Every structure is written in structure tokens, then in C-alpha cells.
Image (cartoon, helix red, strand yellow):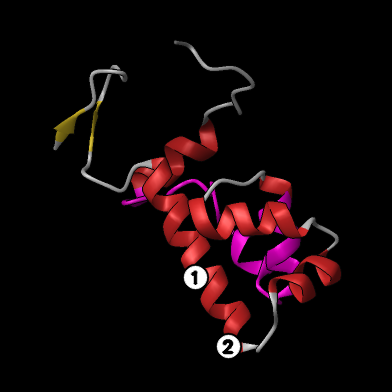
Amino acid sequence: MMYNENMSTAVLASPSPAEAGKSLAERLRALRLLKRWTRETLAKRSGISTGSLKRFENAGKASLELVLKAAHCLGRLEEFNKLFEPPAARSLTELEQRAAAPARKRGRV
């Protein structure tokens, strides 16, 4: 485990948000090129600006709306459906505890 001083908990070594954004942008670009689309084609079909798409592909920086619109246009929006789902219960006891606990509306910390 790696400790991130900006966070109060230990985190597993994983890509930084910037690295994850660049990796996502590279995959989007590869998929766009696989379809033989120019940036202009994807921008026009998805309703985003060419400049914003270029910034995303080059730097990995974009709004969530841009990423979702591009994913929708490329037929990959359904892949976001599992994002932020709670992890599967590891035991029957844990599953029963989850079912018995009231749903929280706010965090404690």
C-alpha cells in the first residue's frame, strides 16, 4: 500500500487521476481511429467542440459531459453503468448486514 499524504487513508498503488485521464483519452482516440473518424467527425456527431476533443485526446482533460457524449457516440456509454457500484458482498453475513442496515444519506466523516 502507498500512503497519500493528501488523504487520510492508505490507498492501493493505482494510476493518478491525470494518468487515468490520459489513458482514457488514448483509448478513445484509438477507438475513433478504428472507426476511421476524424476529430471533427466525432465532435460533430457527439455535439462537442473540436477544440475540447483535441484537448482531451492530447492532455486527458475533459468534462464528464464530454466523455459521456463521446462514449455515447462511439457506442460505449453502457460501460459507465457499473462505475461506482458497491462491491459485491464477500460473505452471506456481510450481505445480511447490508440488507438489515438502513440506507445512509450522509457520510459520517
The residue tagged 1 is 27
Residue 82 x/y as whole percent: 56, 58
Looking at the rendering, which quadrant does residue 70 occupy?
Answer: bottom right
Q: Is residue 92 left or right of residue 107?
A: left
Density class for disc 2 (Cα within 10 Å; few <14, some 14-19, many ≥20) is: few
Please, what secondary structure does the residue beneath circle 1 have? Answer: helix
Give amino acid for label 1.
Answer: Arg
Residue 83 x/y as whole percent: 55, 53
Query: Can you name the residue that lies furthest to the top here?
Result: 109
Looking at the rendering, which quadrant does residue 63 occupy?
Answer: top right
Q: Is residue 62 above or below residue 54?
A: above
- Seen from the viewer's position, the closer of residues 80 and 94 is 80
Residue 88 part of the magenta segment = yes
- Seen from the viewer's position, the closer of residues 73 and 54 is 54
Give amino acid for label 2.
Answer: Leu
Q: Identify the residue at horizontal 59%, vertical 26% (top origin).
A: 102
Q: Is residue 2 above or below residue 18?
A: above
Residue range of the region highlighted in magenta in the rendering: 66-92
Q: Is residue 6 left or right of residue 56?
A: left
Q: Is residue 51 left or right of residue 107?
A: right
Residue 60 x/y as whole percent: 51, 51
The residue tagged 2 is 34
